[in-house]
Image (cartoon, helix red, strand yellow):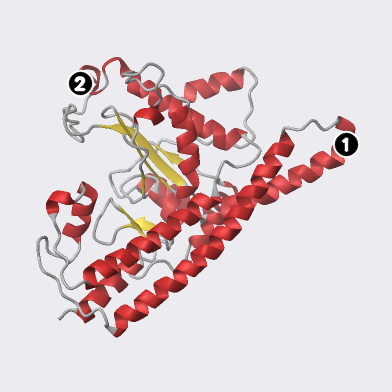
Amino acid sequence: MIRSYGEALRLGWKPLRTIVFASWDGEEYGLVGSTEWVEEYLPWINKANVAYLNVDVGTSGPNFKAAASPLLDNVIYAATKSVLSPNQTIPGQTVYDVWNRKISTMGSGSDFTAFQDFAGVPSLDVGFAPVAGDAVYHYHSNYDSFHWMKKFGDQGFHYHRAMAQVMSLITAQLADLPLISFKAKDYADALGNYVKKVEDKLDEALSPSSDVQVSTMSDEAITEVRASRRKLGGNHKHKATSPDALAFKKALGKLHKAVWKLKQSALELDERAKELESRTKQHIPWWRWPSWLRLALEIRKVNTKYKYLERDFLHAEGLDSRPWFKHVVFAPGLWTGYAGGKFISSEPILFSVLSSSSS
C-alpha cells in the first residue's frame, strides 16, 4: 500500500490532505507506542487529524471484518464495493457483496484506542478474519508464521492484496476529495440505536422474568453477559417501579430528544455538503476567482464541522473511575475488555439501578 502511494507521488499525484503512515512499537505492552505519540502530539492531532485508519491483523482468514466510528461507515461501504473479492463464487462480486456488512463498535486492544477514546478522532479497524471451519489462526504463537500464512491462511496472498486495496481506497477517499467523506446522519442514527439498546437492557432486566438463553446468543452477547453481574439461565426479578429505575428511564427519554435534535442538524450538514460537492463539479472560469474563494471557504466551514463532530463527545474530566478515557459514547466495556461499549458511562448507573431494584 505504501509503495503504491509512493509510486503515485512519483508520477505527480499530490493529495489534498496530508497522509501519515505509522508502524507502532510496544502495542502488546499497553499500546505504549501509539498512546505516547497521541498524548505528545495531541494539539496538532486535535487541529488537523480527520481520521485514523488501523490495521492490526490484516489477514488471518477470508471473511472481512470492520469496526469503526459511525462517521466512517459510508467510507468503508464505498471502498469495499470497489474491490473485487478473492472469493469469486460469482464472477465480479466485490468484498462488499460477500461481507455481512456489519460494522462493530470500537473497543480497545489495538492502536486506535488513543485516537478514538482519548483524542476523539474518528477511527476504524479492518481486516480479513477466520470463522468456524477456516484454518485456525495461531495468533501470538510460534506457528503464527509466514509458512502458516502461505500454506493455510492466505494461499497466493490474494486477501492481503484485497486488504491493501480496501485500505488504499479508504485513505484516498478521505485524503483527496474536497469534502470530507463523512455522513453526520449515520452518527446520529447510531446514537439513537445505542440509546434504544440501553433502554432495552433496562426493560429486560426489570421484567418479571428475564432468563438468558445461551443457545440464541451471539458470541459478543455471551462475552458481555459473562463479564456482567448476571447469571446465565438465572431468574432475575426486579421492581420495575423502583425510583432509580424510573429516573433512569426519564433521563434516557431526554437523551432521545437530544439525539433527535442532533439528527436534524446532521441532515442539514449532510445536505449542505452534498450541495457544495455538486458545485465543485461545475466549471467556473478562472477570472471568477472570488467565486472559487467563496466556495473554498464554505467547504472549509463544512469540513471543520465534520472534523470536530467526534471531538464534541469528549468529556475533559473523563469517564467515572477511568479519567483517561474521554469519549462519552465509545469506550472499551467496563467488564468486557477488548469489546466496545456504547454510552459506556451508563453501565455503572444501570447496574446500580438493578442492584437497588433487586427483590
Tell me residue 60's x, y (percent): 26, 29
Give the residue drawn at x 31%, y 29%: 59
What is the C-alpha distance between the residues marked 2 and 1? Answer: 60 Å
The amino acid sitting under disc 2 is Phe
Give the residue drawn at x 86%, y 37%: 289
Give the residue drawn at x 48%, y 44%: 72
Tell me residue 110's x, y (percent): 34, 45
**Is 80 in front, or is 120?**
80
Give the secondary structure at mark 2: helix
Q: Is residue 130 above or below residue 220?
A: above
Badge 1: few (under 14), some or many (20 or more) residues near its Cα, within 10 Å?
Answer: few
Give the residue drawn at x 76%, y 33%: 282
Residue indicated by mark 2: 152
Q: Is residue 33 visible?
A: yes
**Is 123 in front, or is 190?**
190
Badge 2: few (under 14), some or many (20 or more) residues near its Cα, within 10 Å?
Answer: some
- The mark lying in front, picked from 2 and 1, is 1
Q: Quadrant of residue 251?
A: bottom left
Residue indicated by mark 1: 288
Tell me residue 252's x, y (percent): 40, 71
Q: Which mark is residue 321?
A: none
**Is 32 in front, or is 274?**
274
Q: In the image as oriented, which residue stretches furthest toward the right?
A: 287
Q: Earlier in the sequence, mark 2 or mark 1?
A: 2
Q: Is residue 131 above or below residue 200?
A: above
Q: Is residue 41 visible?
A: no
